[in-house]
Structures are given as structure tokens and as C-alpha cells.
Amino acid sequence: MTAIVLLAVCLLLVAIWWMKSSKRRLFSRMARYVDSLQIGVYQKLANDYSKLHGGERGKLLAAAVANRLFAKPSRHDPELLKLADDLACEIVKNDQEVRYASLMSLRVLMVTESDRENLEATRRIMETVQWMKHFWELPPEAPDPQLMERLAAEFYAKYS
């Protein structure tokens, strides 16, 4: 009887380990698409902002806005960050494609960073999602690998 209980506990532990490692692999795969999406958003914005604000300043603004939308820290000057925050608000209000890609990416990042116990990144991500809620009603769907791959492929095809 004791051997059966011990075997059952071992099987349960193996199943838990397998599920956790499977989840990690799944979200690790989706996290690679997040990087591609952020680059795609940057490229889209850099094209637009370079025309409006000049080449170098437009690229800096695009980087700061993309960082804001993907909850990444930015080390730009305060004046540029203020303008980038205003532009990010406009993007979230008006650009359905970018805001959806950003939100799905944030949902992936929330799981991966909280799984890593990265409290600072998790806090930034939560604050960014809360900030987005001020501008639009967030869709209920969760990201999956096929969705993330499709979004990344679309951004790559359009903006690279």
C-alpha cells in the first residue's frame, strides 16, 4: 500500500513538472513573437514619426513610444518621454492594430515575467495594461502561439 501511494505521489510530481515545463516552453515561444511585434511597431512608428519630426528624432520617439506600449523602460530625456507618452495615448486610442498587438504581447509578458518572479517588470506590465484600460475596453481573449505568430508575421510583412 505504501509503495502504491509513493508511486502515485511520484507520478503526480512528474505530471506537475511536465505541465509547468510545457507552459514555460509555450510562453517562451510566444515571447519570441513579442520581440518581433515590438520591432514591427517600432518600424511602423519610425516611418511615420521620421516624416513628422525629422529622421533621428522620429526614430527616438518611435523607440520611446514602442517601449511605452510594451512596458519596457526608456532612458530618453524627459521632454522626449512626455511627447512619447502623448503619442502612445493617441496610438492606443486610434490604432487598433498596434494596440491589439501590444495588449496581447503584454499578456504574454505578464505570465513570463511573473513566472520568473520579476516583480519590477510585472508591476510595469500591470501598470501599462491599467493605463490602456483608460482608452479602450480590453478584449477578453488570451494570446496563443498561433495568434502571436500571425500578428508577428503580419507586422513583419507590412513594416519591415
Image (cartoon, rainbow, N blue to C red):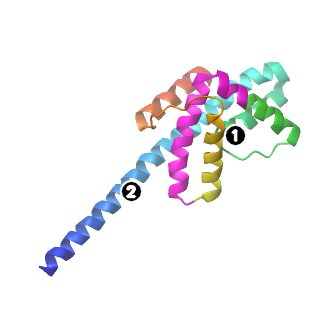
Picture residue at 51% right of the left edge, 43% below the top: 108
Task: Give the labeled residue for mark 1.
Answer: 67
**10 Å neighbourhood of mark 2: few (<14), some, or many (≥20)?**
few
Separation of residues labelled 1 and 2 (CA atoms): 29 Å
Range covered by the magenta-colored residues:
89-117
- Label 1: element kind: helix
- Give coordinates of residue 82: x percent, y percent: 83, 36
Residue 93's quadrant in the figure?
top right
Q: Amino acid at mark 2?
A: Ser
Q: Nearer the viewer, residue 139 or 107?
A: 139
- Please say whether residue 115 is one of the residues in the magenta stretch: yes
In the picture, the disc for residue 110 is none
Task: Give the labeled residue for mark 2.
Answer: 21
Picture residue at 59% right of the left edge, 58% below the top: 118
- Give coordinates of residue 146: x percent, y percent: 41, 33
- Label 2: element kind: helix
1 or 2: tag closer to the N-terminus = 2
Q: Quadrant of the C terminus?
A: top right
- Give coordinates of residue 63: x percent, y percent: 73, 36
